[in-house]
Image: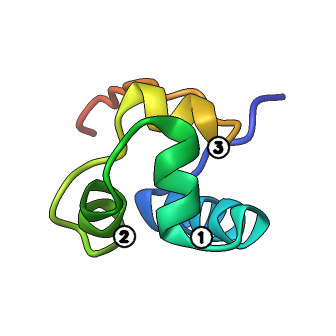
Amino acid sequence: MVKRYTDEQAIAVMRTAIIKYGTQKKMAAALGVTSQYISDILNGRRPISDRMAQAIGLKKTAIFEADK
């Protein structure tokens, strides 16, 4: 079964990844993005991109639900 994550849970996974890299700056350098980009994601100013999701071990998908 596939585990689904909310945006908040995905950001928590990202924070754990930052700890593994040591700092946001080191993670940004390793992934070829800016530390500001990572900060923007963590602070809700940008969504997690497909590339960032993959970098932290997740796969971004869209889920549609029907109204009842």
- Which quadrant is the N terminus positioned in? top right
Residue 15: image location, x then y, percent = 59, 70
Q: Give the Cα separation between the discs numbered 3 and 2.
A: 13 Å
Q: Residue under label 2, please give it.
A: 42
Q: Give the Cα separation between the discs numbered 2 and 1.
A: 8 Å
**Vertical arrangement, residue 1 with respect to residue 24, above or below:** above
Residue contact between numbered discs 2 and 1, judged by CB atoms under 8 Å: yes
Amino acid under disc 2? Leu
Residue located at (71% from left, 61% from top): 21
Density class for disc 3 (Cα within 10 Å; few <14, some 14-19, many ≥20) is some
Tag of residue 15: 1
Residue located at (58% from left, 27% from top): 59
Residue located at (70% from left, 37% from top): 57
Tag of residue 56: 3
Q: Earlier in the sequence, mark 1 or mark 3?
A: 1
Residue 9: image location, x then y, percent = 57, 64
Tag of residue 65: none
Question: According to the image, what is the colour scheme of the structure?
Answer: rainbow
**Vertical arrangement, residue 52 with respect to residue 12, above or below:** above
Secondary structure beneath dot 2 equals: helix
